[in-house]
Amino acid sequence: MAIIEVWQQRHNNASSNETQHNKPAFDNLFGVLELAEAVFLELPPQQILVNVQRVCRRWQDIVTASLPIQQALFFRPIGMQGPIHFMKVSGEQYGGSWVSPQGSRCPFQIYEHPLVAPLLLHEQQPTRAMDRPEASWRRQLLTQPPVRAVTINVGSDNVTLYAGLEGVTMGNVWTATHLCTPGPLFISNWSSWKGYSNMWRKRSASSSLKALKAVKKPCN
């Protein structure tokens, strides 16, 4: 948060000698994508999404242009093989595994979006800003790596979402759940997914991204 506070102080006290003295170096730092990206990656993903982008248009553009940051924020997928899908084991009701588009089993960890439990399980109500149709969280992927399709069970209703190569987003799931009769929500085959909340709020985006990529293993 310190870097955000420094920037805001620079704008609030633009006439001070100290601020004017540091202005060229500060502007030069954030004028280079790679340098600014390295600084932002040391902040938790939540801070980047909620605070960094609101500071100024330049910072928002940097966040949008950075592939590593976009991946840590669940806007861009990890890997290049495309969304994974769940393949059931023939003759078994619950057996199966998440596999690559090529059909090979990939034993990497799947991380779920940090808002899955709070919003989809109705543990908290969305704020007015979050409830807007254009809210950015709706474009975020449901998981990293992304899933091609998922079945949502709400009460006695269920709906299967097919997102194709784009991957299922939080907005897809949110819309689907609100078309069903209110009731307990369950996402089929999500028992193996791992929470991302701790990394989202407390760890740097750089560290979080390493964790996301470290658990991935190439498909054979």
Image (spheres, rainbow, N blue to C red):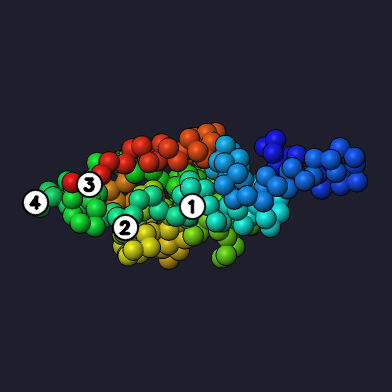
Q: Gap between marks 2 and 1, in whole Å?
A: 16 Å
Counting residues from the start of the chain, the first of labels 2 and 4 encountered is 2
The quarter holding residue 170 reads bottom left
Residue 67 image label: 1
Three-letter code, disc 4: Gly
Residue at horizontal 74%, vertical 42%?
A: 25
Q: Position of residue 188 (x, y in %)?
A: 29, 51
Q: Residue at x 67, y 44 (%)?
A: 29
**SS class, disc 2:** loop
Residue 125 horizontal/vertical position (percent): 56, 51
Q: Nearer the viewer, residue 39 or 51?
A: 39
| Left or right placement of residue 194 versus residue 65 in this view | left
The percent position of residue 179, horizontal first and vertical second, equals 43, 66
- Indicate which disc, 3 or 2, sits on the residue closer to the N terminus: 2
Task: Tell me whether the residue at label 3 lies in contact with that at label 2, contact meaning CB atoms closer than 8 angstroms.
Answer: no
Query: Are dots 2 and 4 in contact, CB under 8 Å?
Result: no
